[in-house]
Image: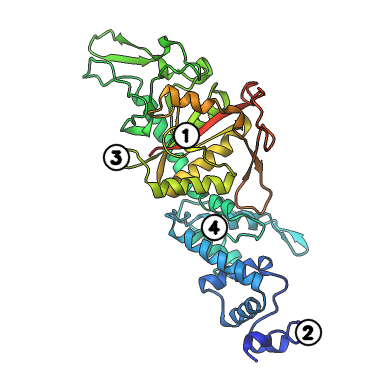
Amino acid sequence: MTDRDAQYDNRGRCDEAFLAGHGGECLSGHIDEWPEAALDYLEGHLDAGRAVVVEAHLASCPECFRRLERQRALSGLLHELPLEPAPAELEERVLEAVLATRELPGRLATQEVPPSRAVGEASVPRRETEHLEPTWWSRLWHSRVRPWVPASIAVAALLLGILGYGLLRSGAENQADYAGSRLATTAAPATTSEPAQTPTPGETRKGAGSTVYAQYSTVTALGSPPAAEAESETTATAAGTTSETIATATASSAETGYLAAAISDRKSMIAELAQVQGPVYFVFVSAKLGGSVSAETSEAVVQQLGNITGLEPLAASLALDGPTFAAYVPREDASALVDLLLSIKASLQLELHLEPQPPEATPERISRLFAHKQEFPVLSAHRTPAPAVSAWSFTTSTLLSPGDTTKRSIPTPDEDGSHVLVVILVRR
């Protein structure tokens, strides 16, 4: 009989004599009930006695063995992602708050905790913390996050949650860039006397913020804004040496009802989805020169979108550029959709723009696409209860019943303003 077999007697009960000789203890239930031990085992931090216990359980429980192997693969993915280490003082701040409010045996803690000191100085009194030994919590903050994924959580949701930290960082950077780009476009440099040029549709403006300004082309099927909105006027300053270009096409959709400038930061994307009229286009482009996404990366976008949302790409005859998706999204779910797309962008090292029209798409192709509006699904987001690593899950529903081939006209969700028609495509 091996050590693994000896942990349990022939009735499946924990053999305490065996465990005492190995410095271990019984593990009740399945692996999700002792995630800290499982994570320590994966990272090689578990002492020999407890490691024997974990291995014995895994040898007798195929379900837990599969769960651990899946966690091992996902933990490997996590460690490959470029995450920023948490501030060294963060653990001390958390412990300070806990120690200041916790209830001690027989009485409430009344000791006054000194205010936080400057970064790098200890904030927790030594007598309260000197007995504490490094734990998995300490290693978590001083290395990188180690999420244990319950069996009920889908792998797709896990991947989205793993990317969350990087997404928050990229979102903050994009917001700062966007603010800078808006300032940069309000006036031309003092040495120029010519109005700034507005890039053509699909052209990416190089410089602060990665903001793309685009003009509308006339597309009857979508309802173009008045031509005057696409014009620019130049106003001379009193000194007569500086020209200020005011592109009326960049007016907010709150005023015009149309998205007139392609944007790439999270906050502005969410705001536009909440108020824009007509369809909008999320476009994945390569960060490299040319903007075209490779076939392999394009397929990865399709797989991630499909796994997480259930959406399927449209038929090749309806695609606007590369793989194309279309769905009606409730306006209140704007933030969930934007966060999802930004997480895919971050994981595949792409760029994502919300554009007023698809790049290089002809009116005929757009008209052909929207002739199938009744076939587009509704994509809804739902809050995911704890302990899920992702705050949102997604479901799709169709307007027509399965097998309904009638040509009858039915209202679409965007007609009453409650939903926005979103087209997602990968530039090829």
Q: Earlier in the sequence, mark 3 or mark 4?
A: 4
Residue under the point 53% across and 73% down: 45
Read off the residue under disc 3.
289
Read off the residue under disc 1.
317
Q: Nearer the viewer, mark 3 or mark 1?
A: 1
Label 3 to label 4, Cα distance in Å? 42 Å
Task: Inspect this view and state whether residue 253 appears.
Answer: yes
Label 2 to label 3, Cα distance in Å? 66 Å
Q: Nearer the viewer, mark 3 or mark 4?
A: 3
Residue under the point 65% across and 22% down: 409
Task: Inspect this view and state whether residue 143 appears.
Answer: no
- Disc 3 residue type? Leu
In the picture, measured across the screen, residue 26 lies left or right of residue 200, that is: right
Q: Earlier in the sequence, mark 4 or mark 1?
A: 4
CB contact under 8 Å: marks 2 and 1: no
Read off the residue under disc 2.
11
Label 3 to label 1, Cα distance in Å? 27 Å
Q: Quadrant of the N terminus?
A: bottom right
Tag 2: Cα neighbours inside 10 Å, few (<14), some, or many (≥20)?
A: few
Tag 4: Cα neighbours inside 10 Å, few (<14), some, or many (≥20)?
A: some
Read off the residue under disc 4.
91
